[in-house]
Amino acid sequence: SDETFAIAMNYLGKNPDSKETADLEAGGDVYMKIRPYVKTFNSSAYIDELANGDSCITIGWSGDILQAKSRAEEAKNGVEVNYVIPKEGTYMWFDNLAIPADAKNVEEAHAFINYLMRPEVIAKASNYVQYANGNLASQALMDESVAKNPAVYPDAETMKKLFTISPYGPKEQRVLNRVWTQIKTGS
């Protein structure tokens, strides 16, 4: 839910990385206003719901939405799924690989990461999951439908509107949990 609040605060013209209680609550108010129209709150079923036409709109990760689009196209069910970035911008996220400080097989972990980041390997992964990757050389090996897709690799103008957020502290987490519970329960 952290990203969801940041998106709402950005929509309101507030700093999406704000840790102020009033800003977090204002972000929650955005969702309370549309709460009567929300079917579900989940982060696991929305791909199939979109692909099957059981949901008309969602907040989701770009690759998940593109997977829903592919599933709908494969099913030939007449459902059209599109990914859009709000004109105000949205949260920018990254998948990362990390090696724990106390890892026992550090050399092997580095070898795996180095293998995965080879252009020919990471291009296949990006083609499959329809997510961007951090190896520019891989784009020449990727399917054009992925490498040239602005939902995967946004243009410079769109990138200016994307943002990240820093971690919330315990106080902010309590506010988020309280407000998110109110949103989910409609109370």
Image (tube, rainbow, N blue to C red):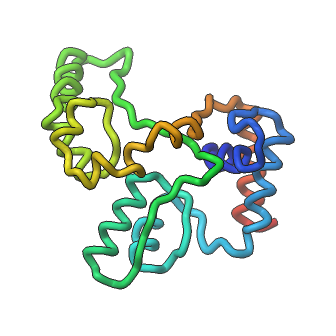
Residue drawn at the location 71% of the way across and 54% of the way down: 180
Residue that lies at the very extreme toward the front in this rendered image:
157
In the rendered view, does 88 fall on the left or right side of 154? Answer: right
Say if 3 sits above or below 39 in the image: above
Residue 102: quadrant of the picture:
top left
The percent coordinates of residue 45 (x first, y second) are 45, 66
In the rendered view, does 83 fall on the left or right side of 59? Answer: left
Say if 166 sits above or below 80 in the image: above
The quarter of the picture where the C terminus appears is bottom right
Residue drawn at the location 78% of the way across and 63% of the way down: 32
The percent coordinates of residue 159 (x first, y second) are 51, 38
In the rendered view, does 60 fall on the left or right side of 174? Answer: left
The percent coordinates of residue 21 (x first, y second) are 83, 38
Residue drawn at the location 27% of the way across and 30% of the way down: 136
Residue drawn at the location 61% of the way across and 33% of the way down: 165
Nearest the eye: 160 or 112: 160
Residue that lies at the very extreme toward the bottom in this rendered image:
77
Residue 95: quadrant of the picture:
top left
The percent coordinates of residue 69 (x first, y second) are 36, 67
